[in-house]
Amino acid sequence: MTAPAVTRRMKRGSIGRSRSDVIFDAILFVFLTLVFLIVAYPLYFVIISSFSDPVVVARGGVTFLPVGFTLDGYKAVFKEKAVLRGYANSLMYTAVGVCINLFLTIPTGYAVSRKDFFARKPIMMFYIITMFVGGGMMPTYVVVRNLGMVNTMWALLLPGSITVYNMVVCRTFFSTNIPDELLDAAKLDGCGNTRFFISIVLPLSAAITAIMVLYYGVGHWNSYQSALIYLNDRNKWPLQMELRNILLLNSIQMTNPVMTPEQLKEKERLEAIAEMMKYSLIIVSSVPMMILYPFIQKYFVKGVMIGSVKG
């Protein structure tokens, strides 16, 4: 290619773009817009339905804007003592559970990332085996019962206090971001392993710590299976169990052909509550995670990519 042709192409590239590039960008923009609408519309529908008349929503009369604007759904949510109690329980379980998870996962991940740790490989092998081989629900229940944790919050928090995948992500993060030279320099200044971990490693691990808070927090907040198995006292139920109970009892009573007047009245009450609170509960139960995510977002990509790609 001659010099003038190269010059003309460079000028053309700097001034404008070719027709094929424009067409490709237009098609890509339309495709991504459609994907965004497909993903975003269900979320938008939940929001507008939470402010709409439940009868209109049930008839399919809500499409793009709220119809029969009302806050009765939210009022019903905050009037139900069981829902508020479950909300408070979930907040407590999530906060305590995340603290336990971080206390075990991050030190373990750091320990097995140290090349000079003599038991590094056996411990990693032990953890990896548990990813593929589990005792099952019944043996786990027997262990929890023998430890006296049935019908306590510890039955929800301690059995899953450390997740092997999260620990591996932490290990990879530490091995790629905490150089051995930093430890050698700290030892020259008289810094021991414990002080090095607390004073140097933890401040440099904000990204992976934030990711662990998000992973474990979402897991605790959405969990209901453990509560279903181990909790007998309704006063200790988390929010997800209360939501499940309202909807499940409503569907069971709707299928019961023979009901006393009292049962019929209770059925009608649960139907009204369930329909009124359905979308409002989705919004209210999502608020804590929606508040948490913006504070963690800046660490999300960095922590996940560094902790998962290498290793």
Image (spheres, helix red, strand yellow):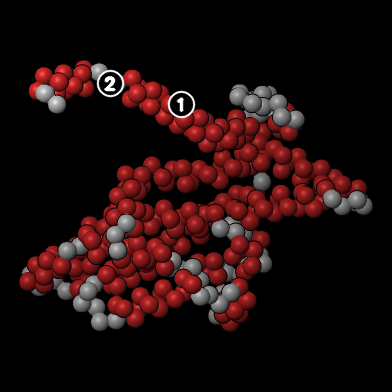
Residue 247 lies left or right of residue 130; in this view the side is: right
- Give 247 or 6, whichever is nearer the viewer: 6
Local secondary structure at mark 2: loop
Which residue is pictured at 18% across the width and 21% down the height? 9
Residue 281's place in the image compared with 233, above or below, is above
Give the residue number, with chain letter if any, for mark 1. 30
Quadrant position of the N terminus in the picture: top left
Q: Where 123 falls versus 167 (above or below)?
A: below
Type of residue at label 1?
A: Val
Check disc 2 and report the residue beneath it: 17
**Badge 2: residue crowd in 10 Å (few <14, some 14–19, many ≥20):** few
Left of 280 or right of it: where is 119? left
The residue at 67%/33% (across/down) is: 72
Q: Looking at the picture, how far across and down is residue 140, in whole percent?
A: 57, 76
> Most extreme residue toward the left, as rendered?
188
Nearer mark to the viewer, of 2 and 1 = 2
- Dot 1 falls on a residue whose secondary structure is helix
